[in-house]
Image (tube, rainbow, N blue to C red):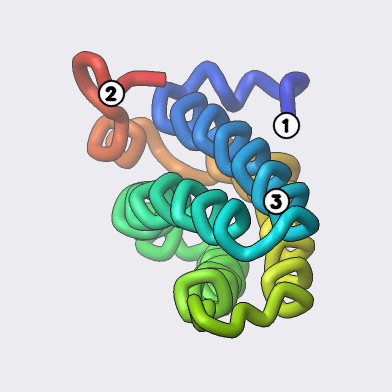
Amino acid sequence: MCNYCGCRDFPLIGRLSAEHEAIANAAGRLRAAIGTGAPAALTALDELLALLMPHTTTEEDGLFAELRAEGSLAEAVTRLCAEHQDIHGVLGGVDRLAPDWPAVLAALDRLHRHIDNEEHGLFPAAVIALPIPAWDRITPTGTDAG
């Protein structure tokens, strides 16, 4: 995860980055569990999805919405949203009776690249692109802050 540009000092970015770390750890546990068999892997998959789904909603309804409205990163946001749909489609659509683990592993690879693109590309760019009123609208309050 990025630690050099200061974007994590923005509460929403800090929260999303912390969630990325938890998601990456859960993805690693899933990858390891796939080698041990379906019951453990399905449990690990459920744990990953429980982290991934609300995280994606927060990104798309908050930061991404503001970036779309601002315009300069709209194309990147569209691509990242398509990646969300792709990754969620594979992970959320696993056949519990006959899991396609190679497809899951490929989705985990795409998830890793996706997180890297957000951490090292989109998040630092968002800090520059968005005006203060946008940050005020999407900054978590109270205990939700980074």
- Residue appearing at x 52%, y 17% in the figure: 9
Q: Please identify the quadrant where the C terminus is shown.
A: top left
Instruction: Please identify, in this view, whether the residue under mark 1 or under mark 3 is nearer the observer.
Output: 3
Q: Are marks 3 and 2 in contact (CB under 8 Å)?
A: no
- The CA span between labels 1 and 3 is 23 Å
SS type, badge 3: helix
Identify the residue position indicated by label 2 in the image.
Answer: 144
Number of numbered discs on residues: 3
Considering depth in this image, is 61 or 22 the residue closer to the camera?
A: 22
Q: Are marks 1 and 3 in contact (CB under 8 Å)?
A: no
Q: Which mark is residue 1?
A: 1
| Amino acid type, mark 1 | Met
Q: Is residue 132 left or right of residue 142?
A: right
Q: Quadrant of residue 123?
A: top right
Compared to residue 119, the image places residue 115 above or below, namely: below
Identify the mark nearer the N-term, 3 or 2. 3
Counting from the top left corner in percent of width and height, residue 139 is at 30, 30
Q: Which mark is residue 33?
A: 3
Q: Is residue 145 left or right of residue 76?
A: left
Identify the mark nearer the N-term, 1 or 2. 1
Residue 17 seen from this side: yes
| Amino acid type, mark 3 | Ala
Counting from the top left corner in percent of width and height, residue 39 is at 56, 59
SS type, badge 2: helix
